[in-house]
Image (spheres, grey):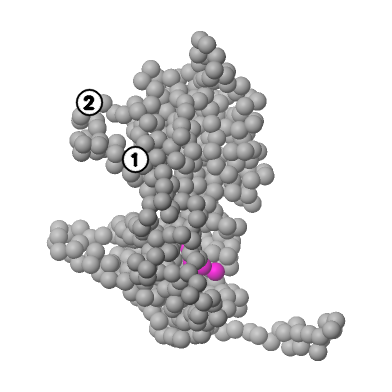
Amino acid sequence: MNVADSAPAMNNLIGSDADSQRTLYPYVTGTSVVGIKYKDGILLAADMGDYLACHDSGSYGSTLRYKTVERMKSVGKHSIIGASGEISDFQEIMRYLDELILYDNMWDDGNSFGPKEVHNYLTRVMYNRRNKFNPLWNSLVLGGVKNGQKYLGTVNMIGVHYEDNHVATGFGNHLSRPILRDEWHENLTFEEGVKLLEKCMRVLLYRDRSAVNKLQIAKITEEGVTISQPYSLKTFWNFAAFQNPTVGAEGSW
Amino acid sequence: MTKQQANWSPYDNNGGTCVAIAGADYCVIAADTRMSTGYSILSRDYSKIFQLADKSLMASSGFQADVRALQKVLAARHLVSYLSFIYQHQHNKQMSCPAMAQLLSNTLYYKRFFPYYAFNVLGGLDSEGKGCVFTYDAVGSYERVGYSSQGSGATLITPFLDNQLKSPSPLLLPAKDAVTPLSESEAIDLVKTCFASASERDIYTGDKLEIVILNASGIRREYLELRKD
């Protein structure tokens, strides 16, 4: 890549034929992941839908192509990852992580990577790909428990990362974080945590057009990882205002 | 076939403000703890202050991923100097603040053609124990000053500091001391006032203020709650 092409005009950077190998836009994407700390560990929620983008020279909308995509996976003994964005890039991240954990196990030294280490590794991977202008088009949530310490962090495709008591990707940042800021507290029980996550996911279901009503909840505690079977949330659409929305509006039929 | 344009930017602005004030025998470095993107708040409790050496602290705002990478690079360079020797072992001492200031400048300029989107203030004590503050732009242009502010609230804070601290012109001969005659506690109060004001009008500044005070007896931290809106 020509150094002189860099700073001012960004569109010069994605130019030559040699660049046909880099990510230009995502094709198959998953939507928000929401995560919270609770009394015994971490809870993550994500739906199972993936949308296929329909591109020609611009965007044409998208179709719900896959309805059983596991967007949350366990990583080693102590962590769990949830991904939104391009699913093929998530699969590649899983290959990186599997290799990381394999090498960690091969040391056979009684130590194993906790969530903090995995999150740091992921952050470096994402940032380095961004530096090469070939990002992994994902926003990731990384949570876990090690030696009683709970950890929950997130990192996105350009390397922006942080940890907090509750995190969310994509639309979750706009719709779920405010709910969590209001209702999250230390020492949520498992049932309370799930209820809180379901509240967040329900709002996303109503308001995020790429959300689908088939979700999983993942739990990680000192004992290990459990990912629930897929299930759906109860929704209510019978509001009076939606029955005949254009009644009374000037010029409508 | 039209060329595909880039539809993502490698940069983002995660906001926040940093301030540093140099005193006769202390240095105050402060930054808010809010991290934002667009109109959303990502975290209300993210520290922008990083200790580079015994007597050097850096406060940085801008693009968080670049700030973090910069912090890691500088920490590594402090540990391992250019020829892969440990700086402390090679030079038999910790890096002084002015030395770190030069290192930061060079590190930033190294990426002149794909910059770290980081706006830094370096604060600490020089080899004589006097407070020193260095202020930077994104590509490493720097100078030693008596006080500085960087980040989203800098335009609101700098004029106020100019009014209160009235640094003598660097063009004067003989050179006049840039450090403020204010006491440590007065400087801390001034910093708190700066951030309370900036939080009123700058949407990216708020939540909490982290103040680090460096003096002969060591290092200490203070916190102040700021507006959360």
Would you name the residue on which mark 1 appears?
B74
Dot 2: element: loop
The residue segment tinted magenta is: A166-171
The span from disc 2 to disc 1 (Cα, nearest Å) is 19 Å
Q: Is residue A229 above or below residue B164?
A: below
Which residue, as the protein is rendered here, is positioned at the far front? B1
A37 vs A202, nearest the viewer? A202
Q: Is residue B107 above or below residue A130?
A: above
Q: Percent x, y for residue B202?
A: 64, 46
Q: Can see residue A119?
A: no
In terms of image quadrants, where is residue A25? bottom left
Q: Residue at x 39, y 22 (%)?
A: B126
Q: Is residue B89 above or below residue A95?
A: above
Q: Residue at x 76, y 84 (%)?
A: A245
B72 vs A41, nearest the viewer? B72
Q: Given this view, does label 2 or label 1 mark the residue nearer the observer?
A: 1
Would you name the residue on which mark 2 appears?
B92
Q: Is residue A123 left or right of residue B145?
A: left
B66 vs A101, nearest the viewer? B66
Ranked by sequence position, the earlier of labels 2 and 1 is 1
For mark 1, does the 10 Å Cα neighbourhood hold few (<14), some (14 to 19), or many (20 or more) residues? some
Q: Chain of mark 1?
A: B
